[in-house]
Amino acid sequence: MSEQLNPEVIMETFSAQKVKIAVADGDGIGPEIMDATLRILEAAGANIEAEHIQIGEKVYLSGNSSGIPTEAWEVINRNKIMLKAPITTPQGKGYKSLNVTLRKSLNLYANIRPCRSLHPFVQTMHPDMDVVIVRENEEDLYAGIEHQQTHEVVQCLKLISIPGSERIIREAFEYAVANDRQKVTCMVKDNIMKLTDGVFHEIFNRIGAEYPQIEQEVQIIDIGAARLATRPDRYDVVVTLNLYGDIISDITAELTGSVGMAGSSNIGKNYAMFEAIHGSAPDIAGKGIANPSGLLNAAVMMLQHIGDIEVAQKISNAWLCTLEDGVHTGDIFNPEFSTKRVNTAEFADAVIERLGKLPQKLKPVHFVAAERHAFSDLFDPLAAPVEYGDKELVGVDIFLDRNNRDPKSLGDALRNIKGTGLQLKMITNRGVKVYPDGNPETFCTDHWRCRYIAEDIDLSAGVIYKEVAKETIIRQLSVLLEQGFDVVKTENLYHFGDKRGFSLGQGE
Ligand code: NAD
């Protein structure tokens, strides 16, 4: 945490100075829930001063494809803390997701999403759930690197870094320790993605060994998500990759009663952004009926983060009182549990009326100290990189665009090209081996991955990779181009010491 964000420093200057925060009112239901939230913060005496910025749909539609103007960056960079209502990314090509841009530009590597049941006051099938999803926030398929390579095939690169994985996994364990949590579950799909998800799993095991007091488990994401949906009470802290985390945190929020209930913090070393987990809900925008709880809970996390503990606690307890009194917005209204259906503004009024009261049936919250959300100052993942041995180039995957769907004719033609220093080992189509000895049933598109290895390896002796030079690959590409093949992409094949740095083709 930087000195500007150090809660102790902020606490000392509390009486003198308000903490300035950038506030984005957002799109759709954004302005309605932001207005309700800011009214509650003001009535509770939060020690903040809002500086409003305009980002999102209007900015996109004015021709700024990033959705964020320079003036808004200036306010964010000055204040370093942001409360953000959901924004709408316009449909269509060319608009970059502003949420992803903010998270990545500001190095907000951790997305913390607590989801707790408020049974019996908010209807849920899972009365005992209290789960925190710790979602990696910058990498994975959300790197947004996509390409159309042939008429039939588009790709999205899934990038997982070792320092990024170390940082989020340590964050999850430190969060568990600091918040008296008992267990951390890692969710991955490394039965299929052995390299990307495999690295995350491997790092979880390695870092987990430093926290023997915390129970640990690893689950495949599909069964993990299914069990989260049916038995969320068996989970405590869940750490996972960006896409899986996005999906399972919506599931867990919805399980608590409504996606409108959960707030989240996006945390980095020097910046922090707080937002509801839901989107701009265009279907109910302008009606004044949205539940402001998600954004309010995000604001409470923000107050804890800046050290305004008492106010955070006062708001949380008033919110719990409101819910246990049965004052509910439409999304959580249920005649069995609710006494009054209210709109967004009325809900805010009800929370304001209850400021200073404690819930009678739900457990009151008691924040003892500023809740730490960012732990990256405790370690530097780049300081002790894992050694994977020497990097050795042992081949190349050359991707071709070819309309003719006969793998044998392609394979035979490629094998006839000799003397380049490389030989064709196999061809796959959408990852499945189709040459040599493919199954005629395999459906083929116009996108072919041709794996080349050193020419003097005896293929009949099994797979033995050996070093090749980059110049050899360039020679191979030149020959292919001369012969009229449409090369759309290459991927070098590396070994790192004993470790193979690429996956085998299915059926290889
Ligand atoms: P959404 O979360 O906006 O809505 C899903 C459903 O939940 C809708 O039926 C909506 O009415 C309901 N809902 C959401 N929040 C609610 C609340 N506070 N109270 C009551 N009901 C609520 O998801 P979506 O429809 O897929 O996305 C709409 C837009 O939001 C898209 O443009 C998307 O890109 C954007 N989005 C933004 C963010 C963000 O800014 N962080 C996150 C997700 C989606």
Image: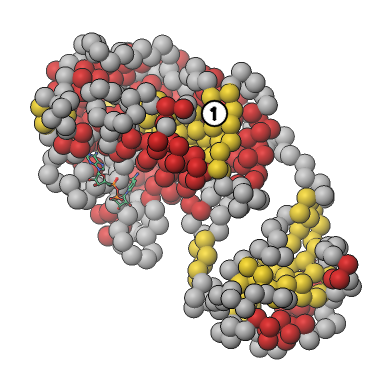
In this picture the colour scheme is secondary structure
Q: Nearer the viewer, residue 265 or 429?
A: 429
Q: Position of residue 496 (x, y in %)?
A: 78, 51
Q: Nearer the viewer, residue 41 or 401?
A: 401
Which secondary structure lies at badge 1? strand
Residue 467 higher or lower than 223, as above or below: below
Q: Amino acid at mark 1?
A: Val
Quarter of the view holding residue 442: bottom right
Residue 339 higher or lower than 187, as above or below: above
Q: Position of residue 247 (x, y in %)?
A: 42, 45
Task: Kindly identify which residue carries mark 1.
Answer: 184
- Badge 1: few (under 14), some or many (20 or more) residues near its Cα, within 10 Å? many
Report the side of 413 relative to 152 (left or right): right
Quarter of the view holding residue 74: top left
Q: Residue at x 58, y 23 (%)?
A: 215
Q: Residue at x 14, y 39 (%)?
A: 289
